[in-house]
Amino acid sequence: MSTKTLVNINGKVVTPELATVSVFDRGFLYGDSVYEVTMTKNGIPFMMEAHLDRLESSASKIGLPLPFNRDEITNQVINTVKELGSTKCYVRIVCTRGEGEITLDPTADQVGNFILITKELPEYPRHWYEKGVWMVISDVVRNHQRSTDPSVKSGNYLNNVLAMGEAKRAGAFDAIMLNHQGMVSEGTTSNIWMVKDETFITPPLDAGLLGGITRQSLLDMGKNNGLKMLEENISPEQIKAADEVFLTSTTKEIVPIVKIDDQIIGNAQPGVNTRKLHVMYQELMENHYKSEKSRLNI
């Protein structure tokens, strides 16, 4: 691997080449697992409580018992990141239903696994933020809520993999996925936003998307600072006619989108409102790290 990496399996920290789970693990066989991705700065986890809330919600929705409680998971993250020793780290928490007989039956006897992947998180390319990125609207429809519920952050990710593959074959940065009604849902690993007449708009949860931690943070922050923030359905035509478009995720923060399919967005440059929101969000991040350092006594 090109970056420094450590893996924690059920509390034991090992190097990547020693990180193994059974081929009978249901996470491998069926994608029967839940996960979260966050990051740390100077050993301090970002929005850990919100990520654990969502991890517990995902596990509850599919009836998956978590192998550790939230305090234990937090301690595993802090200790593993400390051992890694990097200033800024990517953190992936995976909990599987575990190992047992090969059967679809989720009530069969099995022992769950906890996997924590930590690696050094390099800075993303500056041109993403300074020049923006190009995305396509995927032909792959986002899973229906009554199928594989998009509000569950699970290891069953083939839907998103297929959409990302479509984007890469087109030479794009990523894909925007529509729901079964033809409305914007989300990106393959991000939430999607548009700005129209200085109003920030993102699809509602019932558009079939995962409620992002950054998404909710921006909604709260914007409202607290007098910005116009709406959760409304967005059609492909509306997003292509927007003044500005951007995506949000925990590790990427806010990335401007300046082209969708063959349509240039705005003046083909990251918009002033997007830039302003990103500055505000980075201030929120720094304040959060300071408060978490005190709360966790790190």
Image: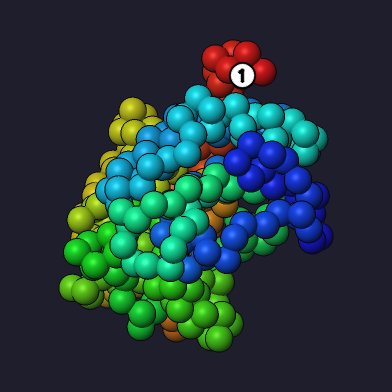
The tally of labels here is 1
Q: In this rendering, does residue 143 appear at all?
A: yes
Describe the element under mark 1 as helix, strand or loop.
Answer: helix
How packed mark 1 is, by other alpha carbons closer than 10 Å (few <14, some 14-19, many 20 or more), is some
Q: Give amino acid for label 1.
A: Lys
- As displayed, is residue 206 above or below residue 239? above
Q: Is residue 66 left or right of residue 115?
A: left
**Colour scheme in the image?**
rainbow
Q: Position of residue 151 (x, y in %)?
A: 31, 53
Please give the name of the residue rendered at 70% of the width and 35% of the height, measured from the top-left corner.
Answer: 81
Q: Please identify the quarter of the rendering in which residue 102 is found.
A: bottom left
**Front-most of residues 67 and 269:** 67
Q: Position of residue 120 (x, y in %)?
A: 74, 47
Quadrant location of the C terminus?
top right
Quadrant location of the N terminus?
bottom right
Please give the name of the residue rendered at 30% of the width and 43% of the height, measured from the top-left corner.
Answer: 60
Please give the name of the residue rendered at 78% of the width and 58% of the height, measured from the top-left corner.
Answer: 17
- As displayed, is residue 266 above or below residue 87? below
**Front-most of residues 204 and 25:** 25
Q: In this rendering, does residue 286 appear at all?
A: no
- As displayed, is residue 142 above or below residue 226? below
**Front-most of residues 91 and 203:** 91
Q: Position of residue 167 (x, y in %)?
A: 50, 79
The residue to which callout 1 is attached is 293
Q: Is residue 56 left or right of residue 123?
A: left
**Front-most of residues 87 and 224:** 87
Q: Please identify the quarter of the rendering in which residue 142 is found.
A: bottom left
Please give the name of the residue rendered at 48% of the width and 82% of the height, measured from the top-left corner.
Answer: 166
Q: Position of residue 127 (x, y in %)?
A: 67, 61
